[in-house]
Amino acid sequence: MSAPRDDETLPDAVTTWPHLVRIELLATLAALSLLTAWSILVDAPLEEVADPNRTPDPSKAPWYFLGLQELLVYFDPWLAGVVLPTLIILGLMAIPYLDRNPLGNGYYTLRQRPFAIGVFLFGFVGLWIAPILIGVFCRGPGWNWYWPWEPWEIAKSPHLTNINLTDLLGIPAAIGGVLVAAWYSLGGVFWLWRRRTPALAQLGGGRYALTAFLLLTMAAVPLKMALRLLLNVKYVWVTPWFNV
């Protein structure tokens, strides 16, 4: 643990050894116990010999790619397979340059870094782990939705025909672009409303614009997933060149 600066107040600071290492050891043992119990209770039998003339249903990617395969249900392939993964990588690379909070450098703190930690947990658990879990436990034959307690032997009819949001609302297709622009304009509205707050003033216009773009894109992913699962909405904005 590095020594805090003179302008930092850490009344509850403790050393890394043994306090943090002890907690990490207990967390590791708990995770290993959970995985061991899971491997005992849940069978993982080998499947039949691969047959090139018979494709398994459902045909799933390895678990570490299931999140991307699940995103293909809700987004155009170029978005789910190229744009979103690229934004994830670039966004993670940009975090050290966007974050202006000097606290928490060299020591662990949740109270002083709730925003940064909350955004990371939302991105990692909500946008990466959750789609993997959905692909593992909730996608059955025909890639239909099955709750974990539902047997796959029960045949389900295909989903209703997916429609675009503009068709659902009965508005011209070009309005979809207006809806997308209005969503990202929320960042500008928040800037005008709270621009005098110290945190936003510290970021500056450029850092705030990039941060707002990444956060709104993150928030749009579960929103689009909800539209697809609840209302069978395929795309929000349809153009001759791309679909969103």
Image: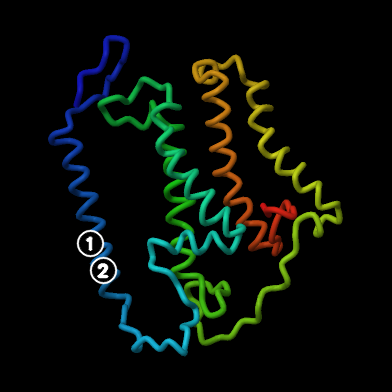
Q: Quarter-wise, where is residue 169 in the image?
A: bottom right
* C-alpha separation, residue under disc 2 versus residue under disc 1: 6 Å
Whole-percent x, y for residue 26 in the image: 20, 49
User: Callout 2: helix, strand or loop?
Assistant: helix
Q: Name the residue under label 2.
A: 37
Q: Quarter-wise, where is residue 48 in the image?
A: bottom left
* Crowd tier of the residue under label 1, counting other residues whose Cα lies within 10 Å: few below 14, some 14–19, many 20 or above: few
Q: In the figure, is residue 9 to the left or right of 114?
A: left
User: Callout 1: helix, strand or loop?
Assistant: helix
Whole-percent x, y for residue 242 in the image: 68, 53
Q: Quarter-wise, where is residue 73 in the image?
A: bottom right
Whole-percent x, y for residue 183 in the image: 69, 39
- Rendered image: mark on residue 33: 1
Depth check: give the residue in front, 183 or 18: 183
Q: Quadrant of the N terminus?
A: top left
Please give the name of the residue rendered at 63% of the width and 31% of the height, measured from the top-left corner. 187
Depth check: give the residue in front, 7 or 221: 221
Q: Is residue 213 above or below residue 27?
A: above
Q: Which residue lies furthest to the left in this view?
A: 18
Q: Is residue 188 above or below residue 82?
A: above
* Crowd tier of the residue under label 2, counting other residues whose Cα lies within 10 Å: few below 14, some 14–19, many 20 or above: few
For the residues bearing labels 2 and 1, Cβ distance under 8 angstroms: yes
Please give the name of the residue rendered at 25% of the width and 74% of the height, measured from the top-left corner. 40
Q: In the figure, is residue 213 to the left or right of 233?
A: left
Amino acid of disc 1 = Ser
Whole-percent x, y for residue 227 in the image: 67, 57
